[in-house]
Image (cartoon, rainbow, N blue to C red):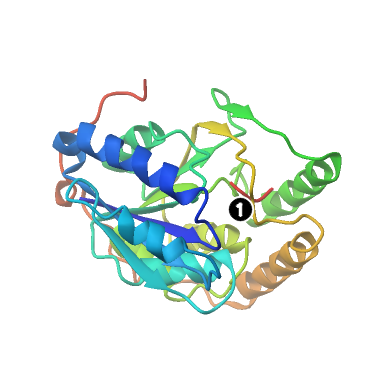
Amino acid sequence: MLQLVIPAFNEEARLPRTLRELTRYATANRAVLGGIEVVVVDNASTDATSRVARDADCPALPVRVVHCADPGKGAAVRAGMAVTTADVVGFMDADGATRLDALDEGWRRILLGADIAIGSRAVPGSDTAVRHSRLRERGARAYRSCTARLVPGIVDTQCGFKLLRGDLARDVFSVLRTPGFSFDVELLARARRLGAVIDEFPVVWADVPGSTFDPVRHGAGSFVDLGRIAWQMRAARPATATVQVIAPRAVPSAVPPAAAGAEF
């Protein structure tokens, strides 16, 4: 069983298509994954996000709706992770920008020993179709130069597609402090501090119109959050291993066949 958290703020227009595609994927891959359950976190939406999520609930793809009043993508994903119980969990964006065969590759890499498998739009083999403004592109380059100091070696921290071993995810998310779009960086920095193996793999990603990320309104705050994360990591005492990494045998043993973002 794989549990996927989908944070959603005013996503009544984009979420239904993503859930339909997930339903088809779950049906086709049940023998490998043992089923997929989705946790949609309604992040104080003012539209029909919760209703369209509940309407998608079906035996092939159970959908649970969780409400999070605290603003921010990080706060929403944290609320969703808090209700998971599976050995392997993950999160993805409501717009379905990452092609779902990334689940195959992420699952395979978890089975082969990674504690976190993160989709990347920037490593060799990735395929991206992006329609970003020049301002957003400049901001993204500056942001990546900052994240490189916090999590060296990880090229794309912000792709909204990540799979994690369940115990590790719940432990790290329980102490996560970043409510906004930079939460991925804190997640990866804290996990690496615990000795987690992080595996970055290429994905097929297409920009989907309707993103709630505003480079002007959210961009400055994201850089401020990076400063806070850097301070937290310096101030924290050396980690003691409190996370029990799930042994490979605790995860379904079948290896799937090889694979066929809103922010920054």
* Image height of 2 relative to 45, above or below: above
Q: Position of residue 165 (x, y in %)?
A: 32, 54
Total labels drawn: 1
Residue 137 showing in the rendered view: yes
Q: Quadrant of residue 3?
A: bottom left
171 sits left or right of 148 in the view:
left
User: What residue is at 56 percent from the left and 64 percent from the top?
Assistant: 73
Q: Position of residue 13 (x, y in %)?
A: 52, 50
181 sits left or right of 249 in the view:
right
Q: Quadrant of residue 231?
A: bottom right
* Amino acid on which disc 1 is placed: Val
172 sits left or right of 47 in the view:
left
* Image height of 160 relative to 134, above or below: below
224 sits left or right of 29 in the view:
right
User: What residue is at 72 percent from the left and 47 percent from the top?
Assistant: 144
Q: Position of residue 85 (x, y in %)?
A: 24, 65
User: What residue is at 45 percent from the left and 33 percent from the top?
Assistant: 99
Residue 29 showing in the rendered view: no
* Depth check, front residue: 40 or 227: 40
| Mark 1 lies on residue | 151
Mark 1 burial class by Cα count in 10 Å: few <14, some 14-19, many 20+: some
User: What residue is at 19 percent from the left and 48 percent from the top?
Assistant: 251
- Residue at the extreme top: 260
